[in-house]
Image: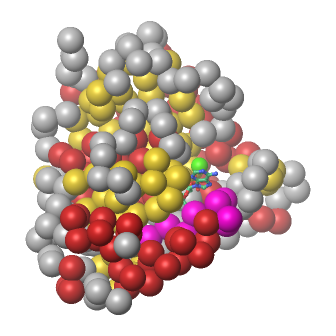
Amino acid sequence: MIMAVSKEKQNGILALMRECGDIILSAHAVETQSGAITVKPGEANFVTVYDVRVQEILIGGLRALFPDAYFYAEEKDNSAAAPAEGLCFFIDPIDGTTNFIHNMQCSAVSVGLYENGVPVFGAVYDPYRGEMYHAARGKGAYLNGDPISVSSRPLEKALISVGTAPYNRAHADQTFQRMCRVFLRCADLRRCGSAALDICWVACGRTDAYFEDVLSPWDYAAGALILKEAGGEVTTYAGQPHKPGEKASILCSNKVLHQTVLELINE
Ligand code: 2AM
Ligand code: CA
């Protein structure tokens, strides 16, 4: 059985995320701070002391609210598979770490909660814009407390954001060919560098679709629920639902243009 997350607990999660947002805003000239950045294995894969600190605060605070939950978080050892039963948080302390290092002011805190493999709550906080997106299963999606919904723009009028999967450069040709095919049919492309924000911008109708190769579950877990609750659609490039806790190449959209963009992606 799936239990609703109480309003009180939801507010507790959002308050913690705002606190983490303040830490992100307090960071200055991260690139020049000695020892602040570590390169993780793989390409374009960075972590800063801020990612680690925000994650510690989130996990500590969430554990107090949900003592039985399991935590699956970006800056943590995730070698064990996420549990299929019980409560499981998917956490990205700073989604858009490269933007954060460059002071691009386009990063977010992302917290998704699954119960028995079903997404039940998701929130994404953009501290730079002071924008909190959240959704609880079956209860709609909200931006700073106001309901949001996807656009109805057709492909030729659509603004579509893309990810270049910089940590996956062996696929660059394929990635850029997909982008080119879509670009030739839509109004324009955008590339913001934070998957969580990309998905939320589709949810609130600023953009109309977003796709990227091989995202990790903490990149999209919260955003995917927010988008579905806002009336949008999320599938893998194969047109299937993504599996909880697994890496996935995903297309998020306003639904209207989902099938056509999927065909362009797979052409
Ligand atoms: P991050 O900033 O939290 O690392 C950029 O293309 C998007 O992909 C960002 O949301 C980024 O999240 C995410 N990303 C970066 N490195 C990744 C990796 N190795 N695997 C999956 N997603 C990654
Ligand atoms: Ca991150």
Q: Quadrant of residue 17?
A: top left
Residue 148 in sight from this viewpoint: no
**Residue plotted at (33% across, 74% down):** 264
Q: Where is residue 213 in the image (x, y as percent from the top left)?
A: 50, 59
Name the side, left or right, on which 200 lies relative to 254: right
Residue at 13% x, 37% y: name it.
139
Q: Quadrant of the image for the N terminus?
A: top left
In the image, 12 versus 141, the foreground residue is: 141
Q: Where is residue 205 in the image (x, y as percent from the top left)?
A: 21, 68
Is residue 15 on the magenta stretch?
A: no
Q: Residue furthest front?
A: 267
- For residue 211, say whether it is visible: yes
Which stretch did the figure color magenta? 162-170
Quarter of the image where ligand 1 sits: bottom right
Q: Where is residue 144 in the image (x, y as percent from the top left)?
A: 25, 52
Residue 83: x percent and y percent? Answer: 47, 18
Q: Which of 15 and 4 is in front in this view?
A: 4
Location of residue 251 with respect to 87 vertically, above or below: below
* Residue 248 placement, left or right of 257: right
Which residue: 88% across, 56% down?
A: 34
Query: Image quadrant for the C terminus?
Result: bottom left
Please tell me which residue is depicted at 73% across the width and 66% down the height of the picture: 29
Question: What secondary structure prevails in the magenta region?
Answer: loop
Judged from this view, the residue extending furthest toward the right is: 34
Image quarter for residue 166? bottom right
Q: Count the marks: how many?
A: 0
Q: Does the magenta stretch include residue 164?
A: yes
Q: Is residue 28 above or below residue 180?
A: above
Q: How is the image coloured?
A: secondary structure
Relative to 54, is 218 on the left or the right?
A: left
State whether residue 119 is above or below residue 217: above
